[in-house]
Amino acid sequence: MNKSKNLVFFGNERLSSGFQPHGAPTLQALINHGYDVRAIVANYETGQSRNARTLEIEAVAKQRSIPVLLPNKPEEIIEQLASYQPAAGVLVAYGQIIPQSVIDLFPHGILNIHPSLLPQYRGPTPIEQALLDGAPKTGVSIMQLVKKMDAGPVFAWEAVTLSGSESKQELTDRLLNLGSQLLLDVLPDILDGSATPTAQDETKATYTSLIQKSDGLLDLSKPAEQLERQIRAYANWPKSRATLFGHDVVISKARIAKDASDGVLVLTCNPGWLEVMELRAPSGRSMSGADFTRGYKKD
């Protein structure tokens, strides 16, 4: 059995849209625990508005002299990947389909940290969807990659209970750190061949969709509870936008109100009421709903 600790890392650790990771915790943890990360394969195009900033993995790569590969398609670098003689791949938010020809290069496959309790919330936006649904719990899965999206067998799951007030940033941070630790726990058994993954129950599979910028428009004909969840799920991107007192704003924090008088800036929904606690004004400055009302409301 191949007991090599050579790995190739796929992804940028940005598990949700607009998420700002604090470094590259999974990549750094693998290195700190003695794994030899031979290369990093990233999906990154300079000039794309949400990606036009330095990837967190690049700082780690530079410090450790790890090559960063940016192929248009992963199959373009099959020979280079094979030259690293990797035992396994680790994938965290890569953002592209990995073809079977690349998966087959790795004796122990490619392991994916997926931020849901698979087979629930397959697809690109599991964190946002859990928040939108008001799910009582979610979690992370360590899955073996297969050609079909998020359908591979699972080596380990770990659940987290949700309070119903988490921001997307908070939940993503929590799941990324949890997934990193769970991977470290199971990786030795995977590499020595003693771990056996469990097939997913296809009858219980649910799917998420890509988020569009237009999804951020607040529709006050919807229930207040749904809109409060949307504001948390769409924080950072695509953001939750509305027109208040004739001004276009981005609402960053809100709470369910008891009635129209329960707060300073309260929106009437269908049903219910939503108090705007924080927003970004037309000036670009963040402020409280109360300050916005004083500064922008006209009698």
Image (cartoon, rainbow, N blue to C red):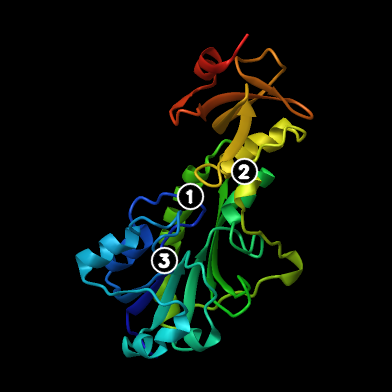
Q: Can residue 64 be seen in this view?
A: yes
Identified at 33% across, 67% down, the residue is 30
Residue at the image position 59 percent from the left and 25 percent from the top: 276
Task: Please report whichever mark, 2 or 3, sits nearer to the chain's N-terminal start.
Answer: 3
Provide the residue designation for mark 3: 44
Count neighbours of disc 2 (C-alpha within 10 A) and say few if under 14, some if 14 to 19, many if 20 or more. Answer: many
Q: Measured along the vertical axis of the image, is residue 22 above or below residue 35? A: above
Q: Residue furthest top?
A: 299
Name which of mark 1 and mark 3 comes first in the sequence.
1
- The image shows residue 253 at horizontal and vertical percentages of 54, 31
Q: Nearer the viewer, residue 150 or 87?
A: 150
Residue 250: image x %, image y %?
55, 34
Residue 39: x and y, percent? Answer: 32, 76
Tell me the quarter of the image containing the C terminus: top right
- Gap in Å between the C-alphas at discs 1 and 3? 14 Å
Q: Which residue does the numbered mark 1 point to in the structure image?
A: 18
